[in-house]
Image: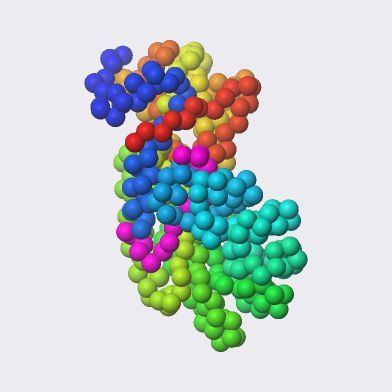
Amino acid sequence: MAKQTLTAAQRRLRDLAKKHGTPLMVISRSALKRQVRRFREALPRVEPFFAVKANPHPEIVKTMVGESTGFDVASLPEIRAVLAAGAKPDRLIYANTVKPVASLIAALKAGVNLMTFDSEYELDKIAEHAPRARVLARVKVPNIGSIVELSLKFGADPSDAMSLLIKSKKMGLDPVGLSFHVGSQCTRVENYIQALEIASILLKDAQLKQLPLSIVDIGGGYPIPHFDHEDDPFDSSAPVIRREIDRLIPGNIRMIAEPGRFMVGPAVTLVMGVIGKSIRENKHWYYLDDGLYADLSGMVFDHCKYQFKVMRNGRTQLSTLAGPTCDSFDIIERGEELPELELGDLVYVENIGAYSSASATSFNGLEPAKIIVVN
Ligand SMILES: Cc1ncc(COP(=O)(O)O)c(C=O)c1O
């Protein structure tokens, strides 16, 4: 059970955990900026509108304002938070296809008038409560292989998109474009290619029907690596997406995207402490101070798999990691190969910035991790 020689990054995490306690979420501002830069360099025609839902921490939103990204907002509280951080309303897209009436009214009053829809019912609502809004029809596109399938719940059939856009015009709205989402953590680049092909056909059709569109919103989905041995999947998919945009979408069309996971995932590390230990069925169980109800909630809602790392060397054995609540659902991993850990040891997870603290609750009165921002 030797303590291993720690890397500089591990020593830093250990010192931060000593200072702030655990569980601790460490957000790296420089990593956030790096992800924005990578996105822009890889897809120069596409303006990133950060999907706030992935991680709405105020410092993250502030950093994105500083980087002049736009924002994909899903609710009135997100709209308020982003505007309060200094974003201009014309840099927001209200990209929830189902919007409560009161939020629509408040969004328009705040100057946010670019929004998506995918049904006739939503158009009626928008026309009544947000007249003259600029609308994008969200179309259903293949989500094959994506970790989170969004076309299950959202997107009009492409064959209905044109009639919806025509209807929106008749209702006094301003039909400006199309949007799609290929599913979150999309490692199958063909989804983007097929979605862009659908968008290309619809753009041509709209032109023929005297309804020229000016925006294509290619949504989110850009994947990140969660494990050390993985190649970065964005590096292989982004050049293909870039090439297909140039092939399929006329140069006068404004391209925007709604990356969430890609912007924040790699920028955050979660450090947890071992608060309990037992042997059950001949296996070591380690109870951590964070779990499925809090910052590891992405394992449930986001179907995320994480790599759990420790700061100890030694012979490994199959072990179980469990969370701190009294619920037996709160078992994190049953088959982790780990050296024997002691109470007070640290277990950490990198690349955990997206859909983690955003969906954490304080079940059993246990607060989610303290969040700190480093440079
Ligand atoms: C409408 C919309 N846009 C963008 C995103 C962000 O997607 P991702 O985090 O995969 O980039 C989501 C995620 O659910 C979404 O629903």
Task: Give 97 or 129, whichever is nearer the viewer.
Answer: 129
Residue 126 image offset from top left, x and y in percent: 70, 64
Task: Give 264 or 299, whichever is nearer the viewer.
Answer: 264
Residue 12 appears in the figure: yes
Residue 346 image offset from top left, x and y in percent: 39, 21
Residue 58 lies in magenta, yes or no? yes
Q: Quadrant of the C terminus?
A: top left
Q: Residue at x 44, y 19 (%)?
A: 21
Q: Is residue 63 above or below residue 287?
A: below
Question: In this picture, which residue range is highlighted in magenta?
Answer: 41-59
Residue 256 lies in magenta, yes or no? no
Residue 332 image offset from top left, x and y in percent: 51, 29
Q: Residue at x 55, y 21 (%)?
A: 324
Residue 98 image offset from top left, x and y in percent: 68, 57
Q: Is residue 239 above or below residue 10?
A: below
Q: Residue at x 29, y 29 (%)?
A: 9
Q: Is residue 115 above or below residue 177?
A: above
- Left or right: where 89 falls relative to 27: right
- Left or right: where 212 falls relative to 228: right
> Where, by quadrant of the figure, is residue 6 drawn?
top left
Q: Quadrant of the N terminus?
A: top left
